Image: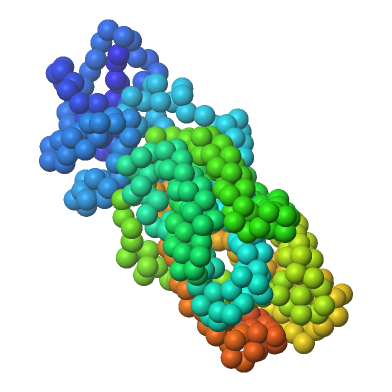
Amino acid sequence: MSFNTEKNSDTEPTAINTPCDSTYQLNAVASDLQLNLSNSTPTEIVVVNIPERPWNNQLEEKNASDPDIIDTDVIESLPLDSKKSKSVYDSENISLNQVPNQESQTSNVPPPDKGYAWAILIAGLLNFILSFGSFNAFGVFQTYYLLDIFKDESAESISWISTLTVVMTLTGGLFSGRISRILGIRNACLAATVLGTVSLILSSFFKKIWHLVITQGIMYGFASSILINLSLTMQILWFEKHKGLSLSIVSAGGGIGSLILVPTVTATVNRYGIRWSFRILAAIYLVSAGIGSLLMRPRVPFKMTKKILDFKLIKDPFLLFLAFAGFTMNWGYCVPLLYFPASLESTGKSISFSTNFIMVFSAASIVGRISSGFLSDKVSSLKILLVCQSVSTIAFYVLWYKRTKFGFLVGFYIVYGIFGLNFFSLGPNIIGRIFPNKKVSLANAMLYLVNGVSSLIGIPVLGKIFQTVGHRTNFDAVIIIGGGMYALSLLSFVGLKIYISRNSSRFDHVNI
């Protein structure tokens, strides 16, 4: 093979005939020398002089077990002058022709937005159907906990079950990078599937509230968080042109899951009891998430960062605005999630009708998420969110607050379903467009962490207010809080838009 060098700057590199002892040595200067492989022959090799790089052995040793993967953590630790050619040393910008074993790599890398990319979309959808779809199904359980099984317990105590479920689902993704580095993407998803299935089976043997806090809350929530984080990351790696659409379809899996799980859980609870309902849900989880996990694989050789927290990201004003918007929006979302079915029941509807009515909300949310994701590939995601948060805020006060007529409540649930949850798909879409690939998983995890903290604080506070102010019958106080939180979320997006306009040089290359 012949490597022909071309002039890259003012000096012509010198070629010498010496043995090549490291693939990385060639690749380490590939961008500086612009190696031309098009006229190569299998019998001749010309190697250029390579500057002394003390970190070269570190790279080889670090990647000895997997030579096709460049480890970004080693590169991040290199001296500043070692990272001059960012396209070579920084894996978020690495081109397929610059990685080791480049000839075989290029021919084997599938294109984005087509082919197996749609299998990855289906895999993410299957994972989301249970991971997020179960939230509304657990809303059915929550109603039975409040009105039947634990009716002599305080609402505040019962709320810890759903609190830990939501918190762990949103925060556990911080560990997805480290786990996937050890097990691989697919095996990490399979391990999470097994943990989630076991947790639901164990939940069926509960006797006390704290039993469900551990099984349904901590164990199930953590398993779901791994599936959610890795599913979002894979969409960003496999899609470019249709990134917004793919993320919104996957995110809509929560609504699709509700359409499947809510009637299933309601019917099985009524017919077989809540314990067998948990076991049936475990079987559905195993099949759906199991298939989704088996389909998972990255498009290019890829390792996620080992970091659990990145303090540079924490200090980024862009992420801070986005996180505060998520914090307040998630707090507001907890209100209809936990209390709307019960508010329907208070108007004279049966428990079964109230819980099954969640399907109306789920169908509306599917329409909203897919529509917003489709639009986000064409117009600004931030503009879409400004509209969505405005409509949602108004809906709380106009259609739900102090309303007892069924027509108003139906209107609220449909409007809120279409406009109220689009941050869950557009937030990761914005992050995928702004942050490099290797930081996407961590940035998403940190955003979900803030949402988890919001749930950790918000759900018990809402339960306490509903208990003391609403006396477990009046929903006005929690509705006011829900609408107020969406208003704060709207203000945060306004602040983010102002920040972007004042720092246009950073954002002028992306559509957010």
268 with respect to 211 (left or right): right
Q: Is residue 36 visible?
A: no
Relative to 406, residue 432 above or below? above
56 with respect to 428 (left or right): left
Relative to 511, residue 349 above or below? below
166 with respect to 280 (left or right): left
Relative depth, front residue between 411 and 285: 285
| Quadrant of residue 315 within the rendered picture | bottom left
| Number of disc labels | 0
How far across and how far down the image is residue 449, in percent?
44, 65
Q: Residue at x 27, y 47 (%)?
A: 73
How far across and how far down the image is residue 193, in percent?
49, 45
How far across and how far down the image is residue 411, in percent?
82, 72
How far across and how far down the image is residue 35, in percent?
32, 27
Relative depth, front residue between 4 and 69: 69
370 with respect to 163 (left or right): right
Relative depth, front residue between 304 and 355: 355
| Quadrant of residue 291 within the rendered picture | top right
Q: Residue at x 62, y 40 (%)?
A: 122
Q: Residue furthest bottom?
A: 469
